[in-house]
Image (cartoon, rainbow, N blue to C red):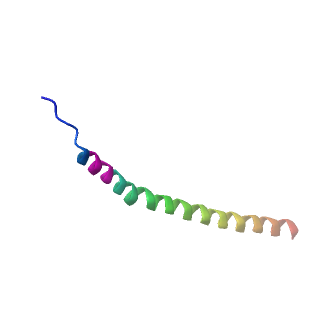
Amino acid sequence: MKKGYNKKEKKSHTFIINTAVKIFLFPLFIFGILLREYDRIFKKSKIKKRTEGLWY
């Protein structure tokens, strides 16, 4: 006998996947953006120090 595929099962699986994405991947995305911004600031300060060293 074949078992019919339930739409409720599919909805529960998508709900579990969506919550996993929200819990794990979204904070990682925010953390990556923050690291990129800090890296930009750090690189800018390094470039300023190099130019000061060239002028003096």
Residue 8 located within the stretch drawn in magenta: no
Pick the front one: 26 or 15: 15
Q: Quadrant of residue 10?
A: top left
Q: In which quarter of the image is residue 51?
A: bottom right
Image quadrant in which the C terminus is located:
bottom right
Residue 52 is situated, as x and y percent measured from the top left of the image, at 82, 70
Q: Residue at the top extreme?
A: 1
Pick the front one: 7 or 36: 7
Q: Residue at the right extreme?
A: 55
Q: Residue at x 77, y 68 (%)?
A: 48
**Is residue 51 toward the left or the right of residue 28 in the image?**
right
Residue 15 located within the stretch drawn in magenta: yes
Q: Which residue is drawn at 71% across and 66% down?
A: 44
Q: Which residue is drawn at 24% across and 48% down?
A: 8
Q: In which quarter of the image is residue 46?
A: bottom right
Question: Magenta part mainly helix, strand or loop?
Answer: helix
**Is residue 45 toward the left or the right of residue 10 in the image?**
right
User: Does 2 appear above or below 44?
Assistant: above
User: Does 10 appear above or below 23?
Assistant: above
Q: Range of the magenta residues?
A: 10-16
Residue 37 is situated, as x and y percent measured from the top left of the image, at 61, 65
Residue 36 is situated, as x and y percent measured from the top left of the image, at 59, 61
